[in-house]
Amino acid sequence: METGTWITLGLYFALMLGIGVYAWRQSTSDVSGYMLGGRKLGPAVASLSAGASDMSGWMLLGLPGAMYLSGLSSAWIAIGLFIGALANYLIVAPRLRTYTVMARDAITIPDYFDKRFEDKSRLLRVISSLVIVVFFTLYTSSGLVAGGKLFASAFGLDYAWGLWITAGVVLAYTMVGGFMAVSLTDFVQGCIMFVALILVPIVALMNIGGVGEMTETVRGIDPGLLNLFRGATVISVISAMAWGLGYFGQPHIIVRFMAVRSLKDVPTMRNIGRAGCWSPSSGRSVPVWWASPMPLAWESRSPTPKPFSSSCPMCCSIR
């Protein structure tokens, strides 16, 4: 790996750790500050950090990979995600922000269930905690795996080293700065992803020759890859769109609703989320229109036989 790349990575990790120290100084004086940032998140930080925590390895590796293999018929997943995320902002966000305060200042989802429904048996707290611990252990593990694969494919580092570096940095700033550190680092990473998800398709399209050339090339390989309804049935479409239902119960996303500064900030947070994560040229919309056709066009038009998937972190483990 080149010296400039090492320097860039070093500066990035130093920034993440610096944010952790800043958050430690700002919001760790009590349990509420450490666990929920003192409910002081601005709408931009709350929205973009929620989007960044959502847009993990599954969206930058899994969803583009699915579309790379099956074509635009996988776009039904993205459509379901769009509807689910929007409904989450409209239905869950304002109510959760209000009732977690009313429920004796609940600071976690299990704590909210316990206080909101006055569960004397503590079963709601125990069961919801177990669900989060079990399933988020697997979810977090997949994120670390994605980090290791990114280091291996993009920077040529050993996979194990990439995994340990990713885990070490995340663990360090989380333990030091708590929820505020996680939200601020996610905000920074969300901004980086926003820019990258715009620039990567633009640069690739410029090398391929434009949208028209890309479309014609992919159509020459397999016209079905550009068909949204290829192999679609009512059950398959509903199943794909049902991915969006997950937003209503993902604690790492909805906890941002609990931490936003005030109820009045929720509409602003929603608008920023829609503009930042759902614009036609960014966020989850990107895999819909480029993750499937662009790599295939790249492979077929490249002067060398090197597959796009061998040089693209998003597709490195698909083929």
Image: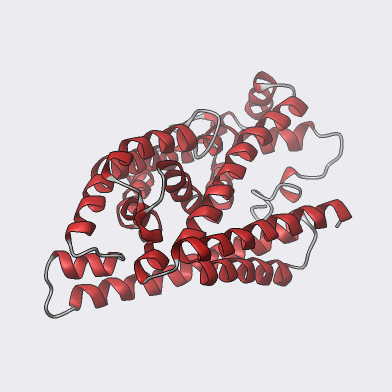
**Residue at (36%, 38%) from the top-left corner?**
270
**Residue 286 position (above or below residue 315):** above
Q: Give the tally of numbered discs.
A: 0
Residue 292 shown left or right of residue 134 in the figure: right
Residue 305 shown left or right of residue 210 in the figure: right
Q: Please provide percent x and percent y for residue 64.
A: 57, 45
Q: Please provide percent x and percent y for residue 256.
A: 37, 53
Q: Nearer the viewer, residue 129 or 286?
A: 129
Q: For residue 144, say whether it is visible.
A: yes
**Residue at (75%, 38%) from the top-left corner?**
299
Image quarter where the N terminus lies is: bottom right
Colour scheme in use: secondary structure
Q: Nearer the viewer, residue 99 or 71?
A: 99
Q: For residue 56, say whether it is visible.
A: no
Residue 17 shown left or right of residue 270 in the figure: right
In the picture as drawn, the residue positioned furthest to the top comes out as 212
Q: Please provide percent x and percent y for residue 17.
A: 63, 63
Residue 13 shown left or right of residue 231 in the figure: right
Q: Please provide percent x and percent y for residue 15.
A: 66, 56
